[in-house]
Amino acid sequence: MPTIRDRLPEARAAAGLILAAAVATIAGALAFEHLWELRPCPLCLQQRWPYYAAMPVALATALAPRAGLVRTGLALLALIFLASAGLGAYHAGVEWGWWQGPSDCAGVPAAAPGSVGDFLNQLEATRVVSCTEAAWRFLGLSLAGWNAVISLGLAALAAIGSRTGREAR
């Protein structure tokens, strides 16, 4: 039975694929935000954190010189993306009305205006983004739902990659 040393290129390739998928997912989120002007809510922004954490871990894992480091890096990536899937599922549940979101999901209050004119200007300029409304759906899933699906796939890839070459029990 091959060991992880024998399968190190495949395990490193899994880390590289995870890195590419994480970069593509964040690029997609930024495209929705800046090109299509779908402003993110607070939960949307929180869902990006695991990707930001995973990118350097995936890069270090792909370049790791020892099999143990590759296995550890992939196991850590699996945990990161399980947490990311949880965030996505939580946000999707808020959008579907299955449970309440955090109290700050209606936006951050602006500073107190100095005059009625300032207040009217703030009202015109302020655009509150609610966590309870999906800005866009594809095949019935919101971006939060798709994040949960993508994250589960990346967690599975990392978990399988971390076990590559282990002897069957």
Image (spheres, grey):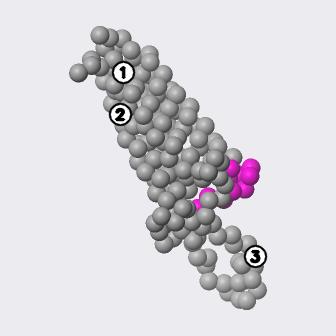
Q: Secondary structure at mark 1?
A: loop
Which residue is identified by label 3?
A: 124
Q: Are marks 2 and 1 in contact (CB under 8 Å)?
A: no
- In the picture, the quarter occupied by the C terminus is top left
**Residue depicted at x 75% and y 79%:** 121
Of mark 3 and mark 2, the one earlier in the sequence is 2
Q: Is residue 53 shown left or right of residue 79?
A: right
Residue 67 occupies quadrant: top left
Q: Is residue 46 shown left or right of residue 7?
A: right
Mark 1 neighbour density, 10 Å: few (under 14) some (14–19) many (20 or more): many
Mark 2 neighbour density, 10 Å: few (under 14) some (14–19) many (20 or more): some
Which residues are the magenta region?
32-42
Of mark 3 and mark 1, the one earlier in the sequence is 3
- Numbered circle sitting on residue 75: 2
Residue type at mark 2? Ala
The vertical placement of 16 against 110, above or below, is above
